[in-house]
Image: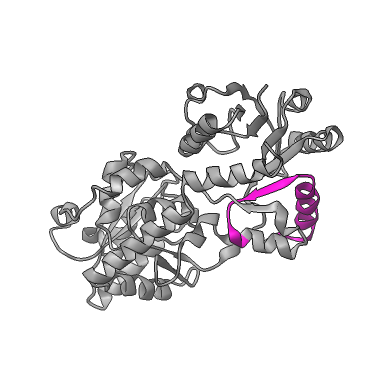
Amino acid sequence: MNSICLITNIGPHYRYPIFNSIDNEFNCDFYLGDKTSTPIKTFDYRLLKGFKGTVHNLFFHHFYWQKGTVRLIFKPYKFYILDGEPYCLSSWMILILAKLRGKITISWTHGWYGREGKVKRIIKKVFYSLFSELMVYSEYSIQLMKQEGFPANRLHCIANSLDSDKDLTIRTKLHRTGIYHDHFHNSHPTLIYCGRIQKNKKPHLIIDSLRQLKAKGICLNLVFVGKDIDNIKLMEYAVQSGVQAQVWMYGPCYDDNKLGELFYNAAVCVSPGNVGLTAIHALSFGCPVITHDNFPYQMPEFEAIKPGITGDFFKEDDVFDLSRVILDWCNKSETERIIIRDAAYQEIDRKWNIHYQIATIKKILNAYQY
């Protein structure tokens, strides 16, 4: 008998390492969704020995139903790990039936953002109260949930991770290279933006900062690593701004060895919109991160940024403040850069890795004498 049933709306490619570790560490069956409202690259579900089937997600505007999942509550599982997603109507049914059948339910959720209106607060409070335990991505969210009256002993920070063991191996081999000098033919500090290029990430603000700093006689380089999925045409904007010689549209890159080199040799990673796993990616390879300071509109990974240590925050949408913060981080000495790099590694090793996540899950299960 398998004791854990894990049901999620989709298996994103980046989550394969943690799901694979769960597959190896626990007696777990996986039921993974086929799609979400926005296209997401998935891993091959068949790689998991505990994979039991693809779940068909049926969408009704903002809501959805995971076909065939409710009946799983009648199988002999002790634990059910679900997305903490109130929009998933089948999860509500599973949670209610689990209460009636004495099953243990565990969320894996963003939890509270801090921007919830009155109606959404009520819905989320009812929904999360149905779970036995709440695994939440960030301490920031946990503090907000405590203020909403959720008991601290049911709240657990699960953090997030990429392929942390692979990244650790890569980082031990990283060193200074001429990747940016060879392209730009100068020794100016280089900023890096890494991830899908989309409007809500506000990448044009970095170009605005380049223009402002150039007007003051300060020249920096900028590399965009990622696919332009919103047809923003950043290079055209760079031309209009007169900084095209300072911008490198690198394009998509899925080679972690090359990404490690790009991050390691950059002065700082800049994400003017919200920052998600890009922060973990950058810090894994020793690169500090800059993003905006409006935390209710951030992703959980923002709290890996320790101001002045592993990165910094600027006033949201304020190009002048962004320029100030960028310049501060580009003026770091090589000695300071080494200290920053070590701090970035320590932050990843402390919390933002697969082993931390597995330990968190074990702690929860062991409390029920799993």
Give the left or right position of residue 176, taking residue 134 as reference. Answer: left
Give the left or right position of residue 51, taking residue 342 as reference. Answer: right
Q: Position of residue 29 (x, y in %)?
A: 62, 26
Residue 248 versus residue 114 in the image, above or below: above
Please name whichever residue, 32 or 24, is drawn nearer the observer in this view of the structure.
24
Q: Position of residue 304 (x, y in %)?
A: 47, 60
Q: Which quadrant holds residue 184?
A: bottom left
Give the left or right position of residue 280, taking residue 60 as reference. Answer: left
Q: Is residue 279 visible?
A: no
Q: Residue at x 82, y 35 (%)?
A: 102
Please name whichever residue, 145 or 342, is drawn nearer the observer in this view of the structure.
342
Q: Position of residue 92 (x, y in %)?
A: 78, 38
Q: Is residue 100 visible?
A: yes
Colouring chosen for the image of the structure: one colour
Q: Which quadrant holds residue 64?
A: top right
**Quarter the N terminus occupies:** top right
Magenta span covers which residues? Answer: 116-140
Q: Which quadrant holds residue 10?
A: top right
Give the left or right position of residue 256, taking residue 44 as reference. Answer: left
Q: Position of residue 167 (x, y in %)?
A: 35, 45
